[in-house]
Image (cartoon, helix red, strand yellow):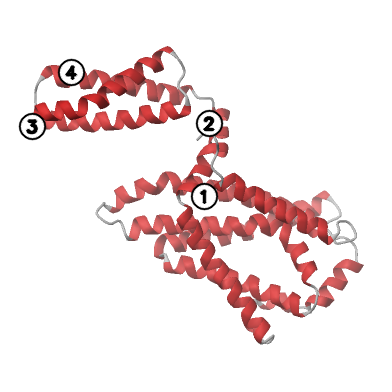
Amino acid sequence: MNIERFLSDRRPVWEDLASLVQRAEDVELSRKEMQELVALYRRTCSDLNRARSYTANPEILGYLNQLTGRAYRYIYRAGHETPVWQSFVQLLTREIPAAFRRERLYVALAASAFLAGTLFGAGAVLIDPANGERLVPPMFFTESPRDRVEKIESGKERVDNLEKAVVFGASLYTHNIKVSFLAFSLGALTIVLGLAILFYNGVTLGAIMAMYILDKVPLFFFAWVGPHGALELPAIIFSGAAGLLAGRALLMPGQLSRGASLRRVLPSVWRMIIGAAFVLVLAGLIEGSFSQFSAKTFPYIVKIGVAIVLFCGLMAYLFLRRSDE
């Protein structure tokens, strides 16, 4: 390596880092400036490692050691000084949405598998209603959709006190966590089975939806499933997307080692999992309470409207870029 050319090419980066560190020591940096500082610090650390391999010049090595040391102290001091609640707010408001936007292609892939299953299930039942029995678990065939609607709408509310809501909500959390964990783990370990489980869940949903449509009670279905489904179904898709991302890094690392490939995607994966978990908690609260009320308490149009607002709000929160980014 030509050391003179190396110094000429890399010195502007070091000067930028020195300038930013000096500014950081005088005033509080903005989020964008902090990101730039971290990027410059990493590049300078890389330059220091290269310089150690090609020269023993104490002036060059001393300068780079001092510069990276100053940057290191500021970066990690700033991290330790951030209050826990502020870090939590930062995670919710910026880091989780940024991870979803960054990995939106994996979210789109997971959503495509789920929607393909939904269309397949609905189409199969609309073509031949007997397919409903073949595609949907037996627990859903205790009565016809119309009979179930009449029973719910003419009887007492299923959740009429806090205790029932808590017990019912706990059972829903357990089921949703199992499905989400399965989607993530199968995606991370095999990719193909992760897509398959998303497709299968879509088939079940589409088949049940078609059964309600054929029995001429579609509004009940959308009002019953919509409020919590607007959050629960995306959360399952998000878990599957995180699994696909991890699986891609583990099974197809490219020129990187598997460890390096996993480390590269881990920040996005754990943020997506945490985001999915928060959404599942909210979905469980809604499913254990608001979703269970019949039209006597909340008209169908109100429940469907709430579902639309929740879904649009979730998509805007995760995928609309902020003006200050």
Q: Nearer the viewer, mark 1 or mark 4?
A: 4
For marks 3 and 2 on the same chain, the one whose residue lies earlier in the sequence: 3
Identify the residue at image location x=47%, y=65%. Answer: 194
Label 1: which residue?
273
Q: What residue type is labelled 3?
A: Asn
Label 2 packing within 10 angstroms: few (<14), some (14-19), many (20+): few
Label 4: which residue?
62
Is 141 displayed left or right of 185 in the figure? right
Is 245 displayed left or right of 255 in the figure? right
Task: Provide residue 128's location: percent of width, then percent of height.
Answer: 66, 87
> Given the current orientation, which residue lies at the most extreme top position?
26
C-alpha span from label 1 to label 3 = 47 Å
Q: Can the viewer see residue 198 in this picture?
A: no
Q: Which mark is residue 2?
A: 3
Label 2: which residue?
87
Task: Provide residue 293's location: percent of width, then percent of height.
Answer: 83, 58
Element carrying mark 2: helix
For marks 1 and 4 on the same chain, the one whose residue lies earlier in the sequence: 4
Q: Which of marks 1 and 3 is in front?
A: 3
C-alpha span from label 3 to label 2 = 44 Å
Q: Which amino acid does label 2 sit on?
A: Ser
Element carrying mark 3: loop
Identify the residue at image location x=71%, y=75%. Answer: 140
